[in-house]
Amino acid sequence: MSANYTAILWNQQKKLYDRYMWLGIGLFMLVYAVFQLWLQPSITFETLIIRATALAAFVLLHLILAIGPLSRINPAFLPLLYNRRHAGVSMFILALIHGAFCIIQFHALSDTNPLISVFISNPKYLETSQFPFQTLGFLALMILFLMAATSHDFWLSNLSPAIWKVLHMGVYVAYALIVLHVATGAFQYENHPFNWILLFIGFWGISGLHVYAGFSERYKLNTHKNILAENGFYQVCRVNEIENTCAKTAFINGENIAIFKYDGKISAIHNVCKHQMGPLGEGRIVDGCITCPWHGYQYLPHNGQSPPPFTEKVKTYDVKILEGYVWVNPVPKEEGTFVEPVIIEKA
Amino acid sequence: MSKKEFYIGWQGKMPENTRKFLKRFLWIAMALIVVMAIGLVFFEKPFKKHFFNFGQLDQITGVYYDEPYPFILTDYNAESGQAKTVLLVGSGKFGAKGIMDKIQDKSGALSGIRITLEGTLISGDGKTLLELTNGTDALKEMLNVELIETPAPPAPENVTLQGEILDPKCYFGVMKPGEGKIHKSCAIRCISGGIPPVFRASEGDSQDERYRYYLLLDQKGNPCNKEILPFVGEPISLQAISTKMLDWDVLFVNIKDIKTQ
């Protein structure tokens, strides 16, 4: 968390993250280059750069897309999610180098403007086998640029988390374009089954992880146990079903609610973090604050406010305990509204 | 991760079990990365043994001709009819015609004159090209007018061929690879810029990679660069009249007789 904007916010964990990420990128490119020069020494420098950066970016993109569902399936992957934005920007830099070298190599020093040439040199847009695959890569690069340029918290705050999130869901459009770019371009020439198997595993692996994580998420949402009680309160679970410093989540009348147990009390707040819409209900109470599992943003459980000097606020909800059951009123209070925590009476 | 563990990025230290889990994950990921990188290279198509003497200027002496594309005839044996022509190309994605026209504006017509040109050699599969890297400074020497009586070309014959239209500058050495869809846009730009289009026809079965190369001209024997652009860099079949120009096979083709496959 940071109260002020800085160009790039690094801390010990982020430095460690970036170090291992670039070690992986470097290792891939080094091994690729060494074997390339060994097995095919006549490769040109430009082709080596074009291929190494493209492959490194594509592999990294798969990892980036896998981090979200992996973290939902197993929270031990959450450290990979913490600094995913740096991975995204790094991937964009690799893709940009690939794109720039391709435009120079295949389109520059010609009778047409290189950027226009990308779109008009091969005009067979209506033919599957000859489709101008470079345009797909170019469009994907533009989406990745937009995402990299707005990746900073300044944009997250100014665009609003909801709009920022929608914008950054563009990564799936970019991924689809890149898969098509590879399938209708490079793999039309480098068409060994090994390459197609890798592409197949990558695409279906990412798709499968998302579907699996989506189903398990849906299962976790407590939507089927709610029984309407008096005064608009809904029964959620038994008090002892909630672990201390943890939460149970409930999705009632369109409200996504996290009900936390801490210090012998119960409080309910909105389940969506103000930062990047992380699932607060999967977080913990740390130092008296609900702590988001994604980036560690914090909120006080009784009023949904971030501790000063931070200013984020989330909605709060009335809760009550009846005969050992937790009940919640899904009508939200204004963001940051104090709600008296319910004391858990010992049986 | 232990149920009691909770990772917070801004905290200095990662919980122990999470750290161990990620360490295992990283080792597996790194091993996969290495295997993948090696596999991707190992299963690549081998590059053709074509050659671009990048950064090195060579001088070639021979008799210059303007048409159908600028070339010089370096070796010619009248008795055997053996000839070696060197196609000239410009820098970047341009043919040599613009440069040779400018040179001739200063020096006078060079066609049929023995000259020495300096440039970068491109060669592969028995064909040689010279890139006039330094533009109009390429002309190093004008020697003498040389009348060469070339042998009469063989009788033209109708042929039907399958293959791909390539730009010879990239294909014979500048780019690796310089063929197929991956290179299609570049080949289109090169041919559009005046580099002579070459038709590569497979000889024998597709496995042994023996090819025959033809210079492509229209039915009247004129360059047809712009007209054939829609067919560059993809599998095509064509019907044409085939003949020979020194050591180059030549096809006179009607665009209507080119079909995409």
Image: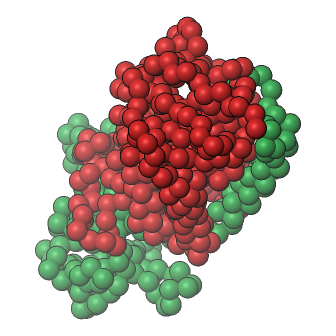
Chain colours: A red, B green
Question: Residue at position x 55%, y 47% from top?
Answer: A236
Q: Residue A262 placed where, x, y %?
A: 70, 29
Q: Residue A216 placed where, x, y %?
A: 58, 58
Splitting the image into 4 quarters, where does residue B138 fall? top left
Question: Residue at position x 53%, y 33% from top?
Answer: A319
Determine whether A6 is above or below A262 in the image: above
Toward the viewer: B39 or A24?
A24
Residue lying furthest top = A309
Splitting the image into 4 quarters, where does residue A334 fall? top left
Is residue A231 visible to the viewer in this orientation of the structure? Answer: yes
Toward the viewer: B149 or B23?
B23
Q: Residue B232 placed where, x, y %?
A: 30, 67
Question: Residue at position x 53%, y 55% from top?
Answer: A225
- Marker count (numbered): 0
Determine whether A195 is above or below A116 in the image: below
Is residue B55 visible to the viewer in this orientation of the structure? Answer: no
On-image quarter of the C terminus of chain A = top right
Toward the viewer: B125 or A245?
A245
On-image quarter of the N terminus of chain A = top right
Splitting the image into 4 quarters, where does residue A35 fall? bottom right
Q: Residue B153 placed where, x, y %?
A: 29, 82
Determine whether A313 is above or below A283 in the image: above
Toward the viewer: B133 or A261?
A261
Question: Residue at position x 61%, y 48% from top?
Answer: A237
